[in-house]
Image (tube, rainbow, N blue to C red):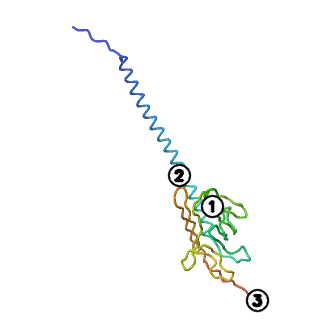
C-alpha cells in the first residue's frame, strides 16, 4: 500500500506565476482606474464650461430681451453699432430696477472679448476672448438686419425686433439671437389738453 501523499503547498514556480498574474491584473485595473478618473475630470471640466457658457448667454438674453423704449432726455433711447449697444432694461445683472446698461466688444490679443457695464457693477468681462469676427446686428420692423441702430429722435420704432451677436470661438461658431419682447414703438404719451387740469 502506497503512502498517502502529504498535503503539499505551492511550489516556488506556482507561487511566482500566481504573483505575476496578480500583478498584471492589478496593473490593468490601475490603468482602467486612471483612465476613468481622467475621463471624469474632463467631463466635469466640460460641464463647468457648459454651465458658465449657459449663464453668460442667459445674462445676455435677460438684459437684452427685456429692453424698454425710453425718451432721449430720460434714461435714453437704445443705440448700437457693430461693436456694442446701450439700452434701458428692468433686469440688469446687479438686480431689479430700471438701469441703462452697455454690452460691448473690446479688442484683445487675437480678437475680441464681450463686456457688460452698468452704473452699479461697473464693467465686467463676460466672454473672455479671443472671439473672431465678432459683431452685433439689429433686426428692424421690415425684417432687415442692420449694422447700426440709431433711430432719429422723432422715430416711432425705437427698439429693434431682435439683437444678434455673431462670433467664432475656439470651440466653434457662437450665435446668440435675442428677441426684444417689448413693443418696439414709442408708447403714446398721455398729456393734459388745454388749460383745464380738472378731473
Q: Which residue is mark 3?
A: 198
Mark 2 neighbour density, 10 Å: few (under 14) some (14–19) many (20 or more): few
State the residue at coordinates (57%, 79%). 141
Q: Position of residue 144 (x, y in %)?
A: 55, 77
Q: Position of residue 112 (x, y in %)?
A: 62, 60
**Which residue is nearer to you in this view: 104 or 95?**
104
Residue at mark 1 to residue at mark 3: CA–CA distance: 52 Å
Residue at mark 3 to residue at mark 2: CA–CA distance: 63 Å
Q: Give the farthest residue toward the left.
A: 1
Residue at mark 1 to residue at mark 2: CA–CA distance: 21 Å
Mark earlier in primary sequence (1, 3): 1
Q: Position of residue 158 (x, y in %)?
A: 64, 78
With respect to residue 116, does 183 lie above or below? Answer: below
User: Cβ–Cβ below 8 Å for labels 1 and 3?
Assistant: no
Choose top left, top right, bottom left or bottom right for residue 64: bottom right
- Per the image, label 3 sits on a secondary structure element best described as loop
- Per the image, label 2 sits on a secondary structure element best described as helix
Left or right of 75, for residue 109: left
Quadrant (top left, top right, bottom left, bottom right) of the C terminus = bottom right
Q: Where residue 114 is drawn, which disc sits there?
A: 1
Q: Which residue is mark 2?
A: 47
Amino acid at each position: 500500500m502506497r503512502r498517502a501523499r502529504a498535503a503539499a503547498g505551492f511550489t516556488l514556480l506556482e507561487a511566482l506565476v500566481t504573483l505575476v498574474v496578480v500583478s498584471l491584473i492589478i496593473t490593468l485595473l490601475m490603468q482602467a482606474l486612471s483612465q476613468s478618473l481622467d475621463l471624469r475630470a474632463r467631463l466635469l471640466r466640460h460641464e463647468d464650461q457648459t454651465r458658465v457658457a449657459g449663464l453668460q448667454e442667459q445674462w445676455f438674453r435677460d438684459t437684452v430681451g427685456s429692453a424698454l423704449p425710453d425718451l432721449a432726455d430720460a434714461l435714453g433711447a437704445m443705440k448700437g453699432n457693430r461693436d456694442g449697444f446701450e439700452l434701458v432694461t428692468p433686469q440688469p445683472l446687479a438686480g431689479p430696477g430700471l438701469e441703462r446698461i452697455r454690452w460691448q466688444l473690446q479688442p484683445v490679443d487675437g480678437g475680441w472679448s464681450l463686456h457688460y457695464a452698468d452704473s452699479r457693477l461697473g464693467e465686467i468681462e463676460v466672454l473672455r476672448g479671443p472671439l473672431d469676427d465678432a459683431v452685433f446686428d439689429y433686426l428692424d420692423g421690415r425684417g432687415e438686419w442692420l449694422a447700426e441702430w440709431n433711430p432719429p429722435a422723432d422715430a416711432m420704432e425705437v427698439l429693434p425686433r431682435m439683437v444678434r451677436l455673431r462670433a467664432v470661438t475656439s470651440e466653434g461658431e457662437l450665435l446668440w439671437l435675442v428677441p426684444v419682447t417689448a413693443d418696439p414703438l414709442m408708447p403714446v404719451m398721455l398729456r393734459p389738453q388745454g388749460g383745464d387740469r380738472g378731473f
